[in-house]
Amino acid sequence: REDRVRSDRLFYFKDMIIDTHTHLYDEDFREDFDSVVTRAKEAGVYKCIMPGIDSSSYGDMCEVEKRLAGFAYSAIGLHPTSVKGDWEEELDFVKREFAGRRFCAVGEIGLDGYWSREFMTEQKRVFYEQIVMAASAGCPIIVHLREATEDLYEVLEQLRRDGIRPRGVFHAFSGSYETYERINKYGDFMVGIGGVVTYKKATVAGVVERLPLERMVLETDSPWLSPVPYRGKRNEPSYLKEIVAKIAQLKGCTTSEVEEITTNNALTLFNIQ
């Protein structure tokens, strides 16, 4: 194809971008699913990564992946807010599914102290075990972290003691540049940049200014966290263009540079070339 361009690392498709975090299987997309996908493709979205949450949404996610083969890719994971009384059964479900087929990532996994800390001990165990599972297969992880940074360091220290160095992406990163540097000493991590970067006074904007593009991937987290000018409305993958434009502004580069580098980053990280 004429729009296939050779970079110094990989082939990429010119003016095509990858949404590395979208819940396309969510019920918010059911009424106009086909239109959402059409708008995404028209906006240059080339592929999408769909993070897993728990067993209750797994069937819907797999159905979307089958329906959009080559466009939408499933990850598998137990989200920290789904770690409750039945966490052992849910974790066993993740392990069985992971053993039975190939996934592009293990995620969305991590720690969340915002909604509740009732099961934080269990969250840390589930997070640790899923990282070990991913590492055993050379699979990247998609990390959710919210108001649990010190808990995160406990898990990362345990992994380091056990000789495990994970790789993946910190989804919807909201920490400081110094926090990123500290986290990255424990593994090989990129950061997912989404709609929040377009908000006024967003602290992640300062991180984007300092962080090389080679350490970023794009995401929407749709149907949530819509970028300006869609804030307050349902998010969707086509809005990735707004995020690209904001990153280019912050980095003082062209949108084409943002698209090329982040696309190559995602292709490499998730091995979906």
Image (cartoon, helix red, strand yellow):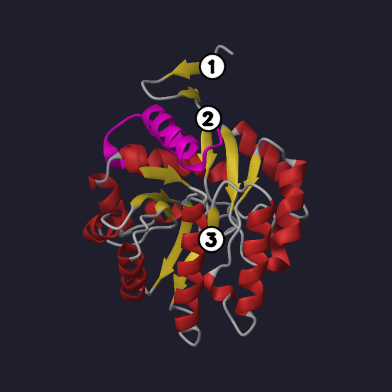
Q: Earlier in the sequence, mark 1 or mark 3?
A: 1
Identify the residue at the far bottom of this view: 118
| Tag 2: amino acid | Met
Horizontally, is 68 left or right of 266 in the view? right
In the rendered view, tell whether residue 228 sits above or below residue 112. Answer: above
| Tag 1: amino acid | Asp
Identify the residue at the far top of this view: 2
Kindly check if marks 2 and 1 are in contact, taking CB atoms under 8 A apart as contact: yes
Residue at image mark 2 = 16
In the rendered view, tell whether residue 90 sits above or below residue 178. Answer: below
Instruction: Give the image quarter of residue 117.
Output: bottom left
Q: Earlier in the sequence, mark 2 or mark 1?
A: 1
- For the residue carrying disc 3, how many other residues have a C-alpha within 10 Å: few (<14), some (14-19), or many (20+)? many
Viewer-side residue, 167 vs 252: 167
Range shown magenta: 249-273
Residue drawn at point x = 21 percent, y = 59 percent: 178
In the rendered view, tell whether residue 176 sits above or below residue 255. Answer: below
Kindly check if marks 1 and 3 are in contact, taking CB atoms under 8 A apart as contact: no
Residue at image mark 1 = 3
Residue 88 on image: x %, y %: 61, 77
Viewer-side residue, 74 vs 256: 74
For the C terminus, the quadrant is top right
- For the residue carrying disc 1, how many other residues have a C-alpha within 10 Å: few (<14), some (14-19), or many (20+)? few
Residue at image mark 3 = 108
Q: Earlier in the sequence, mark 3 or mark 2?
A: 2
Query: Marks 2 and 1, how far apart in space?
Result: 9 Å
Instruction: Give the image quarter of residue 149.
Output: bottom left
- For the residue carrying disc 2, how many other residues have a C-alpha within 10 Å: few (<14), some (14-19), or many (20+)? some
Residue 177 on image: x %, y %: 24, 56
* Element marked by disc 2: loop
